[in-house]
Image (cartoon, grey):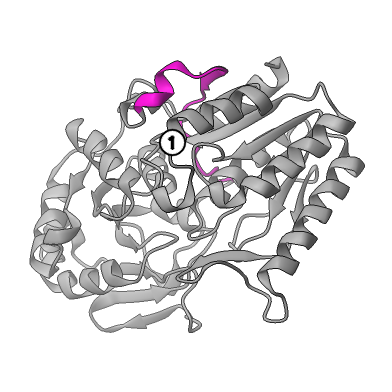
Amino acid sequence: MNVLFYCQHLSGTGHFVRSYEICRALAERHDVWLTDGGRHVPRPARPPRMRLLPLERLARTERGVVALAPDKAADEAWTLRRAALAAAVEAIRPDAVLIEGFPFSKWDLHDEVLALLESLRFLRPNAPVWCSRRDVIPPARVDRVPADIASAAPGVLAEWFDGVLVHGDPALATIEMHTPWARDLPVRVEYTGMVCERVDGPPPPLPGGASDGCVLVSGGGAGDGRLQAVAERAWPRAREHPVLAGASMIVSAPPFSASAVESTAHADRVIRTPFDAAFAGWMRRAALSVSHAGYNTCATVLASGVRAVLVPRSNMSDQVARAALLAERGLVKVVPEDDLNEHTLARAIRHALDAPPTTGHGVNLDGASATARLLERGP
């Protein structure tokens, strides 16, 4: 098949990382194009049958969605993007299309997505269209969606989509748990399992000369660096735990930080390093992960079996729900963001190290391969 995957990350990295992994799995047997129109996200090497489709780059800021190119006005960027997508549909003639998020979210992109689907319907009227969704669907932000999304989204699904692929395990969470109007959607709904970042070959070397048994700290794709700063202050107390004797703390910088970060070792065995595509591999060598509760990091925690402390961001409602679901099963320790300081985090780290690893959890992590199989089967 020729598969076109439309994904637009506007704030963080999570949606692009998940979509990239799905495309890697699809490209084992199919030709795949993934749109790339946000800030650059470091990723592992692409397989030969996977290509990126470059679009004018956009990001969400306090001023709304803006063009990243300094010489482009937002209106010009939108026009160029729509033309590029129409040309791609004509050139690729896709046999299947995936749309990340919309219409459950991403209503900023409504006009662009519908223009893409109109081009597809004209050139490939029988090509199935799937909505690609993560596990927990938070309430949509009212200022970016129709006043009554419970009516608008199902109508869009009925008119333009053949199905919804939910990249989660229904034994852990179903979409209607947090989105009641999703109980009766007008299209087929399939759960694929969670999508994990695949690590090919042996785990990559750790930055700064660190050895196995480290503590790995990440603030996620849209984090502001506060968690990393608190973790560094908590480290002197946390490393009193005997498991961490001689261990290092590796602190991954926010991916879109204004100043460049190089891997550097500091006092007390703290290593600061840039956001890196090798992160999932590093986690397989760590004794503990400290992070927010974003989809990709939680999936990697479950895949690696590493002990974990989660600090869900309160302004990201999917994170609060996801952290609670994992904590209820005894898989992670949680520190509420309002309670975060060096004392509460050090205590949570020590408690997590005394808990069993997250192996044997039974959560389905085959989401990328299952997505490929479902597309091959058809709607």
Disc 1 marks which amino acid?
Asp
Residue 215 in view, yes or no: yes
Q: Is residue 90 above or below residue 233?
A: above
Image vertical order of residue 284 relative to residue 98, above or below:
below
The kind of secondary structure element at disc 1 is loop
The residue depicted at 47 percent of the width and 72 percent of the height is 274
The reply to whether the magenta stretch includes residue 198 is yes
Check disc 1: other Cα within 10 Å, few if <14, some if 14-19, many if 20+: few
Residue 92: image x %, image y %? 87, 40
**Residue 115 location, x and y as percent?**
75, 43
Q: How many marks?
A: 1
Q: Which residue is mark 1?
A: 148
Report the magenta residues as a range: 180-200
Of 132 and 108, which appears nearest the observer? Answer: 108
The residue located at (82%, 55%) in the rendering is 84
- Image coordinates for residue 149, horizontal then vertical, percent: 45, 36
Q: Name the quarter where the C terminus is drawn.
A: top right
Write the residue at 82% across / 38% down: 119
Q: In x, y percent, where is residue 11?
A: 49, 61
Residue most toward the front?
147
Q: Is residue 234 magenta?
A: no
